[in-house]
Amino acid sequence: MVEPRADNKLKFQEPKKARKMAQALARALGEIGRAPVSVMHVCGSHEQAIAKYGLRAVFPRALNVIMGPGCPVCVTDLPEVDEAVALAMQGVRISTYGDMLRVPGTAKSLADAQADGARIDVVYSVGQAVELARKSRDEHVFFASGFETTAVATAAVLLANPPANFSVLSAHKYIPPVMEIVAEMPDTRVEGFLAAGHAATITGWGIFERFVERHRLPVVVAGFEPLDIFAGLLKLVELIRDGRPEVANTYPRCVTREGNRRAQEVLWKVFQSTGGRWRGIAHVPNGNLRLRDHFAAFDARRRFKIDLAKLWDYAPPSLAQVCICGEIMAGTAAPTGCPLFGRECVPENPVGACMVSTEGTCRIWHQYGGHLNLGDSR
Amino acid sequence: MCLGVPGRVVAVDGSVATVDFWGVKRAVRLDVVDEPVEPGDYILNHVGFAIRRIPPDDIEKTLALYDELLSVVAEDDLMAADVRGEIDAAEDKKRG
Ligand code: SF4
């Protein structure tokens, strides 16, 4: 077991308050009277905060906090990376967020393609990608990843008269449907969800009401400060204890019931949700965001003939078959359960997507030291 | 990539605001924020777009959190890297 790095432990404001909340958590868990109680968060920033501050060491043993599919880079499916790589190899200029560069595709990553001479730019914002296109005559494709929060930005630039040589290869994903999938997985024992504060800034917490009704599982929207996370977990455990499947919002300073209506309008004007695979998890109905027909001219999939066949001259990296990212994101394994973790697979030389992204569980655990909180309490 | 970062609006020019993030001024787009934004307001920036106007009551707490995130951290800290990335995501106005 990798221990949390001591210097990260509880290095935040008001550790006393956190300990008090941990005690309250333990009390509520005691009242439930069985262990473990498993809850899942679906947010890379939650995992970052939990790992960074060593919170797993403070969580009561009876509480099992699982990281779900909350890292958009990690759930980008191999064929999506393949499409970007194929386009890059066809001479189209690609721009994308930094994390996407090293995500392995079936044959190679964008970074590999770059090493082979493809022209790829890392941008922090889709706005920069548009500017690059404006200054050039070449075809520019923005390889777009991220959940609804990021998709809103992509949608906004498409509504603001982008240049004709600009298009989007969308790997955007939509979080609410994947929670349904995880809730229905036969081997998940998840009894409640901690939802990501910032995605809910856009969608509003009301979006979880139908989920709660259907699955009879509580959902709590939480911020990502240590105390926010404690407050969210406490509320969640209380709802589980009381048998009350409800939505609660412990992050009212950012999230309202309706969310950001204008952003939702922008999002759905440009995108529609369709079914698609999330890497390692499953086919998720309505889990992918794709451009509507009206924006076909800006849809790289419709604008180009993407020549995937060319890619298969390369042998797929064999180590990748050992990668258990999928099980980790479905909550049935921890990074330390992967034989490659910290050995063949490290941030400088990642085998799986979870080791690439700053929000990937393996990368986070490798950086901060994880605490194996799966299986040891059963 | 899911972390929004707060900044103070210095000026508004149509659908673009100049926003101060810890002394760094960047242009942030206002296409999707659902409330009118004025100089002096705080917004949450996500990949170069304001996604929320932060209610005045919450500004202090929100800023304290980010102060802390940016101050205690080593160069290789993932959360701090994401925060810096978010600040960089707002385009430099000179370029834009
Ligand atoms: S350590 Fe690497 S190979 Fe193993 S599950 Fe994580 S990303 Fe995949």
Image (tube, rainbow, N blue to C red):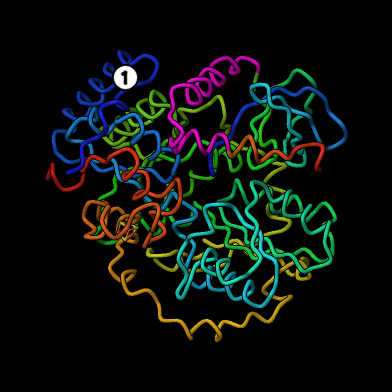
**Residue at 43% of width from left, 22% of height from top?**
B72
**Left or right: where B74 falls relative to A7:** right
Chain assignment, label 1: A
For label 1, the SS is: helix
**Residue at 65% of width from left, 16% of height from top?**
B56
Residue A354 falls in which quadrant of the image?
bottom left
Indicate the position of residue A294 as horizontal and vertical percent values: 78, 67
Indicate the position of residue A107 as horizontal and vertical percent values: 46, 75
Q: Nearer the viewer, residue A172 or B8?
A: B8
Residue A262 falls in which quadrant of the image?
top right
Indicate the position of residue B36 as horizontal and vertical percent values: 79, 28
Q: Is residue A345 above or below residue A195?
A: below
Is the CB of the residue bearing disc 1 within 8 angstroms of ligand 1?
A: no
**Is residue A170 highlighted in magenta?**
no
Would you name the residue on which mark 1 appears? Answer: A18
**Is residue B61 highlighted in magenta?**
yes
Ligand 1's image quarter is bottom left
Q: Nearer the viewer, residue B7 or A151?
A: B7
Labels in figure, total: 1
Magenta region, residue range: B56-84
Q: Amino acid at mark 1?
A: Ala
Q: Is residue A218 above or below residue A28?
A: below
Q: Quadrant of the N terminus of chain A?
A: top left
Q: Nearer the viewer, residue A262 or B16?
A: B16
**Left or right: where A137 falls relative to A189:** right
Magenta stretch prevailing secondary structure: helix
